[in-house]
Image (cartoon, grey):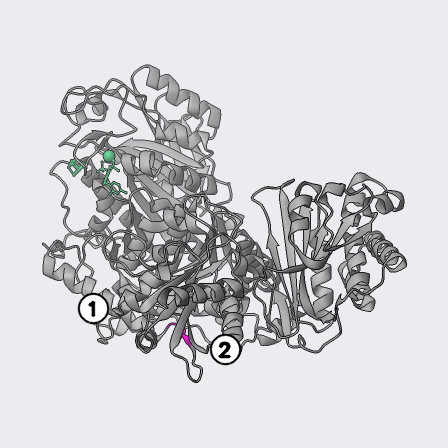
Amino acid sequence: MSYIAKPKVHHPSLRKNALGLTRRDYEGAITTLCAGCGHDSVTAAIVQAFWDLDIEPYKVAKLSGIGCSSKTPAYFLREAHGFNSVHGRMPAIATGAGAANRDLILIGISGDGDSLSIGLGQLCHAIRRNVNLLYVLENNGVYGLTKGQFSASADHGSTSKKGEINGMNAIDSALLAISLGATFVARSFSGDKAQLVPLLKAGLAHKGLAFIDVISPCVTFNDHEGSTKGYAYTREHQIELVQADYVPEHSEITTDYEPGSVKNVLLHDGSTLRLRKVAEEYDPTDRDRAYALIRERQRLGEVATGLLYISPDAPDMIEQSEAIAEPVYNQPFENLCPGSAELEKLQLRFR
Amino acid sequence: MSNQVNEFAFKIATPNGTGSASANSLIMQTIFRMGIPVTGKNLFPSNIQGLPTWYEIRVNKDGYTARTPIFDMMVAMNSATYEKDIQEVRSGGWLVYDSTWPLDERLRRHDINFIGVPLAEMCASAFRGVRERILMKNIAYAGALAALLGMDTDIIRALTKEKYSKKQSLLESNDRAIDLGFNYVKDNYACPLPIQLETMDATKDCILIDGNTSASLGCVFAGATVGAWYPITPSTSMMEGFKGFCQKYRRDPETKKNRYVILQAEDELAAIGMVIGASWAGARAFTPTSGPGISLMNEFLGLAYYAEVPAVIFDVQRTGPSTGMPTRTQQGDLMLCAYASHGDTKHICLYPSDPREAFEFAVAAFDLAERFQSPVMVLTDLDIGMNDWMIPKLTWDDSYRPDRGKVLSAAELDDLKSFSRYLDVDADGIPYRSLPGVHPKGAYFTRGSGHNKFGGYTEDGDEYQEVLDRIARKIQSAALAVPAPIVHRRAGAKLGLVTVGGCHAACKEALDLMAADGTPIDYMRVRGFPFGDEVRDFLESHETNYIVEQNRDGQLRSLLTLETGVPKSKTESILYYAGFPMSAHHVISGVQKTARRAS
Ligand SMILES: Cc1ncc(C[n+]2csc(CCOP(=O)(O)OP(=O)(O)O)c2C)c(N)n1
Ligand code: SF4
Ligand SMILES: [Mg+2]
């Protein structure tokens, strides 16, 4: 079986973005995931976000680990380099690629098994380094690809398809990210494109690691009664805290917002993130408040979604490394090699 | 008794963490600047303070640098190991000890000479504070040795002056401590001893350097821009070296920004992942590690092999298995590195024998990794990596340009009708590569899962096999590109001797000694893997080949028989794996043992 290339038929009526590209140009191969899988909805939102932002696909590198979720980079941005690496190790690949070429736009796709079990360490350290990466965790509470084992995000007391009850506490990735000092933490739902697309766009514009935990139900192994990451459960218990609207720097802000409920966050590229507080007075730049709020909602059996925390000015990995403004990977050799005269001089030290 | 001029060995025993390193390097450098060939081996414990440490110095006018098992003199500065240290002196030799405290008479040997120097007492009255007294006691024994061995005191003065030019008070203390030891010995003993130094002219074109420093310098000269690592003895000083050289040579003169990125990873899995990510994005990237790190890197190494991503890995070997003896040397990772990871894999390996080759092979490793789009392992060991070796000066050819391999530029991609990542366009097994962020036509999906020659996912057996077979051809073709074995044949030789890496010094000396004794033996030192025809031809041309290496299981021997098809019966192992560098004596007694068995 070879992979299925999607026929690239252009419909004349498809809208074009500023680059003259249609949404189709941001798609990839046809998905091989189960029909109705939440991950495919996330893929569609990613396509939309890149198209909206007029990003040239080839400037992007899309990376992943292993899992159903990690397969999805094949299904968007066919003109971008992809790297489906090994289980739980996407962050290391992203870190290296970002170190070599700081101009790459990095998006990493992972699953809850990939990120919260085998790759938990790498997730934590990528957050600590503040790698300039949009990190999307497609969270379904199970290992999809290995057929339905509980993952570390499965809620205490939730049941598997086979009826087993999970007796362990879940790792809440958003709480984890906030406590590790992440500079952008959001949570959304695969079925809520209206919320997810602006968050993805804001995450792409964010300098540093933008972590988005997307509840993305596995229809095959985790969408039954007793699962807490299925469609029905999530729709019912999702509480939108903050609605984010991403406004690119070159567009005028035209939409009207209800007075007194809008907060503008200026992103590093000059664009603005407009946050509409739909739930209550909520300040996503207050780390302690963000942490407390997720916990409060959890106690009520609710899932707080939206942009939970942002710190737009923290230096990212490459700034911390004090590297030159250009990518290091293609520096001219003359700039890298000291040459024979220097070698001769240096060796006086070793006599 | 006749004098032993420029041909002797001595050993300095100290407790770890008492600052003997600067005294020892002062002694080494003085002898070296007197033009006399010298080597130093630091035998240190896995501990920060307190456990015993020895520093062995061998002076040899003929330039032999291997470890020697016979010590003419011991400088016993560690009361905890007195008993053992005294036993180690050859009959008729000398023992220097701190006579501040009387020597336990039970330890006295009557066949050696005891030289007592009240080091602690002298330093207690000359210096203030515990720290300075302890440090200066070391410098004082260096002064005593200067008198006993006949070191050139002008050179010693020049060295301390260079070293402490910016710290006048330290310079004064050091000079004072040297005088204390020197004058006491001069006044109380006949100097110099029969083991003595005499100025020569044999080190003019040489340097004293350790292999981690030279390998890191190789990375700088090769144009490496990303280094990722997780600290592990004995590789740690390699990244420290890289950082130091980068700070000197890789700062943009205007912006003061770095033309490199160093990533201290959370573990070796991450370190190799970062190297693969950086190389995939086009950088020359490397990671230094040791055996435990290689074990952790296995899964990723298979990915790099199969997805054809360059990576340069330095394995500064230490003793295994498991944590083993972290501060002792071995060649225990030969097999692991050659076939690291599950499935059918085989990796290009380079085996430097000293710090000079560590520098040269570091550069070669990047060229090979990018040319063959595959991981390249550079295997040194603790002895090469951390000890000071006397080597011919490093040289650099300014016409060198890195071989970046078949990487398509934006313009080349633009001209192409279409690009397929794994097509064997040139029928040499090496496909063309594109970098992310360069051109839309270059896009492909890198994966460790089954793929066909176009880069597409596949579960089709034929498509899968086609790619896997091409990779095997590609790696085998690297046999012609890795450094060729060094072969030295001797007239009348019937036997062959094969070795790898740092055993070279011991083998060279042993072969010279045996030839002088009427047993000429042919010699081959392998320097790269996969092996080429030359390696097989050498083995085939001898009825018996001794394979000399530092591990228990004869890993080089296994590799040689596996890869060349030469029957194991044509080979005999000579093994030494106790954790210290090998000496000529190990090689000679190994040859004699098998010869006895055969007769
Ligand atoms: C080293 C290693 N161990 C185990 C596996 C098997 N494996 C593949 S995917 C997976 C779990 C994936 O779960 P998750 O990341 O949640 O992705 P999902 O399929 O749920 O999207 C496992 C255990 C593997 N590929 N590699
Ligand atoms: S098994 Fe679950 S996660 Fe995997 S593709 Fe099917 S629905 Fe999606
Ligand atoms: Mg999952």
Q: Is residue B163 left or right of residue B127?
A: left
For label 1, the SS is loop
Answer with the quadrant where ligand 2 appears in the image: top left
Magenta region: B482-486
Q: Amino acid at mark 1?
A: Leu
Residue corresponding to mark 1 = B423
Say whether marks 1 and 2 touch (CB < 8 Å): no
Q: Is residue B239 left or right of residue A41?
A: right
Labels 1, 2: front one: 2
Count of numbered tags: 2
Mark 1: give few (<14), some (14-19) or many (20+) Cα within 10 Å.
some
- Gap between marks 1 and 2, in whole Å? 53 Å
For label 2, the SS is helix
The subunit letter for the residue under badge 2 reads B
Residue corresponding to mark 2 = B515
Q: Residue furthest bottom?
A: B491
Along the viewing direction, whichever of A203 and A168 lies nearer the viewer: A168
